[in-house]
Image: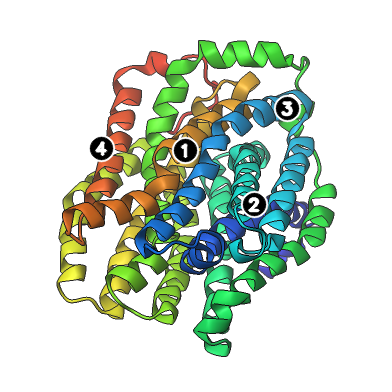
Amino acid sequence: MNGKLANPETRAIVGSVVRVASGNFLEMYDLMVYAYYASYIANAIFPSSNHFASLMLTLGTFGVGYLMRPLGAIILGAYVDRHGRRAGLILALLLMAVGTFTIACTPGYRTIGILAPIIVVLGRLLQGFSAGVELGGVSVYLAEIATPGHKGFYCAWQSASQQVSVMTAALLGVALSSRLPPETMAVWGWRIPFVIGCLIIPLLFWLQRSMEETKVFKARKTRPTMSAIFASLAANWKIIIVGMLLSTMTTVCFYFITAYTPTFGEKVLLLTNRQSLLVTFFVGLSNFIWLPIGGAISDKVGRRPLLVFFTVATLITAYPAMSWLVSSPATIRLLLVELWFSCIFGCYNGAMIPFLVEIMPLDVRTSGFSLAFSLATAIFGGFTPAISTYLIHVTGNQAIPAVWLSAAAVCGLGATALTGWHRSVWETAEPEASTY
């Protein structure tokens, strides 16, 4: 292994992966911090005499940022396809940094009144706009620098970098809950993770500024205009719809096992905040392990077999697993159930991301990928914490979020079937893709 890393070409590739994934880290770190401290943000920014209403406003604001993702995917994605992967990713990081700083520094409702929630919502909208292209831009970049036959493994590091964010945010939460009493956390302690996010922004800019453009993009003889990219997106609407359905399974499962876990553990299972965050940390670690494994397996056996297997596994096991968990809530049960869902997410996503890159036409590869994924996140995934909370509230069934996860699996399975039955859906995709 040391010999391989000593190879200058290998070191250069590893460096490129780290640089491009760094902005992805900030995006997911900010999202996880907001989700983990939802109950504190609810009290500081969205106070109400009804705690459920206050929490729903906070989780709704978490989800509303995703409504900007499709717009960011189209505008920033077209910018990336026109001006280059590197330039687009640096712009996205800049916008994300401004959104993070806004949320970190906004005074509470008791200080500036209605301006507090308005400013936080605007910060989330800006973060959502930026995030619309971040994942797609990173995935396309990794796919274009991948060595032959290893595209799935390379693309997996996009999602793997997000898991580092999940673990970092969770460990920070455990440390804060150990050091600061709940009263202090409610007043100002919840802001510390956001401030830390602001402090690491200069390092991320330094890393991404040293990133090189991909050879695939530099080799293109023509650069489509913005209007041509928009026209191509409209012409390829079938691919984008299929990509959205494929991505629904990934986005719902991811936010279910990461962003929603602290709220579910604390408010539904009545575990401590520290217990819930520790489970979330191990989920992030498990995701980090399974993602490259899923990508590497898909390089060997093809993408579609994994997509079919793990969507069917979700349909069979999701509700029984959640029913077993809520029948006797305990930290170990929550951990076991979440680790199983983590395996499903990691292996499915490891195959899905390169598959989505492969079926997108080259001229709109970033914008098409980003739009498909952003639509799935905006309509389904980003609202998973709020929808799960609401479903439990109206039904009284604590296992009901499993139905939402199963519905997402149906979307993924249906999209996979469409790609098998109607190959014309991606007839304009890149010829090299052979792992369907």
Q: Disc 1 residue type? A: Ala
Residue at 50 percent of width and 83 percent of height: 182
* Numbered disc total: 4
Q: Secondary structure at mark 1?
A: helix
Q: Earlier in the sequence, mark 1 or mark 2?
A: 2
As measured in the structure, the alpha-carbon distance from the residue carrying label 4 to the one carrying label 1 is 18 Å
x and y percent of residue 163 in the render? 53, 61
Circle 2: element type: helix
Q: Which residue is mark 4?
A: 410
Q: Which residue carries the number 1 mark?
A: 378
Q: Amino acid at mark 4?
A: Val
Residue 146 in view of the camera:
no
Labels 2 and 3: the sequence-earlier one = 3
Tell me which residue sits at (21%, 54%) in the image: 400
Q: CA distance from mark 2 to mark 4?
A: 41 Å
In the rendered image, residue 84, in percent from the top left (x then y), is placed at: 76, 31
Q: Quadrant of the C terminus?
A: top left
Q: Are marks 4 and 3 in contact (CB under 8 Å)?
A: no
Mark 4 closeness class: few <14, some 14–19, many ≥20 residues within 10 Å: some
Q: Which residue is mark 3?
A: 79
The label on residue 115 is: 2
- Give how far apart the Cα atoms at labels 3 and 1 are: 21 Å
User: 212 above or below 161?
Assistant: above
Q: Which numbered disc, 3 or 1, marks the residue that appears first in the sequence?
A: 3
Compare marks 2 and 4 and give the one earlier in the sequence: 2
Q: Nearer the viewer, residue 12 or 113?
A: 113
N-term-proximal mark, 4 vs 1: 1
